[in-house]
Image (cartoon, rainbow, N blue to C red):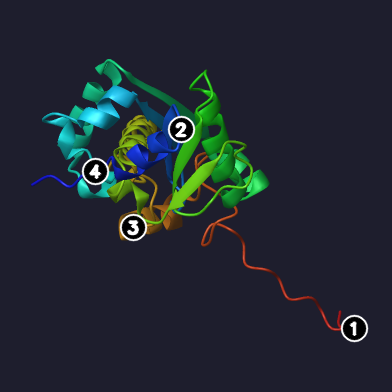
Amino acid sequence: MVFDRFTHERACLAKGSTRIAGVDEVGRGPLAGPVVAAAAVFSSGHICAGLGKPLDGVNDSKRVSAKKRELFFELLQSLEGFEFGIAVVEAEEVDRINILQATHKAMREAVAALGKAPGHLLVDGHAVPSLVQAQTALVKGDSLSYSIAAASILAKVTRDRMMAKADAEFPGYGFATNMGYGTRRHLEALGRLGPCPLHRHSFAPIRPEPQLGLFAGDQ
């Protein structure tokens, strides 16, 4: 039996909300690469009727194989009555404004990319104060809501493809397999090669350790 992941969307419809968007991001933890966010809107028809196979298997991107993520990515984009927006914040800006602000910016831009503003947002994790629409924050929402799960998959596949392309441009770090996360191979490559332009210089161990000041009178 498939878990009903439209429960929260139907509750919003019952309260009079229309155009309910799920919002999620990927890429908060890696040492390299962008933060990517997506916003996903299913039509009220989909919400009321449910998703047919194979889209009823849409779930948290971490619980779906890479092959299925790619399949769902293509099926979602061609699904009638489905809208989405995707936004990217590059590593350089992550360093400039910090990872939390970069994540929130990506979410705002993903929602704005929908064109017509949604009436209510279902946000994975914690509330995002800078999102102007009414919102419901759902911890582990990508496992509870099809809208958030779809956003999770769109963001994950987009970022994974970017990192696979980066692997060819900056070989040696294993970006196509580690997606910028701090795996052993990645850390070893950093030791040999140093950081590349995709690395986040505000993240340890790339960030320099603070230097202790000299005591007064020391020379």
Q: Find residue 5 and report its image quarter.
A: top left
Tag 2 residue: 16
Q: Which residue is at a point 27% across and 44% down the rendered structure image? A: 61
Q: Residue furthest right?
A: 217
Residue closest to the eye, 179 or 54: 54
In the image, what residue type sits under mark 3?
A: Thr
- Residue depicted at x 12% and y 31%: 54
Local crowd at mark 1 within 10 Å, few (<14), some, or many (≥20)? few
Query: Mark 4 vs mark 2: which is more N-terminal?
Result: 2
Say whether disc 4 or disc 3 marks the residue closer to the N-terminus.
4
Residue assigned mark 3: 183
Which residue is found at the position 33% from the left and 25% from the top?
A: 44
Residues at circles 4 and 1 in contact by the CB criterion of under 8 Å? no
Whole-Å distance between the Cαs marked 4 and 2?
26 Å
Amino acid carrying mark 4 in the image: Asn
Mark 1 and mark 2 lie on one chain; the one further toward the N terminus is 2
Q: Which residue is mark 4?
A: 59
Marks 1 and 2 close (CB-CB < 8 Å): no
Q: Are marks 4 and 2 in contact (CB under 8 Å)?
A: no
Mark number displayed over residue 216: 1
Q: CA distance from mark 1 to mark 2?
A: 67 Å
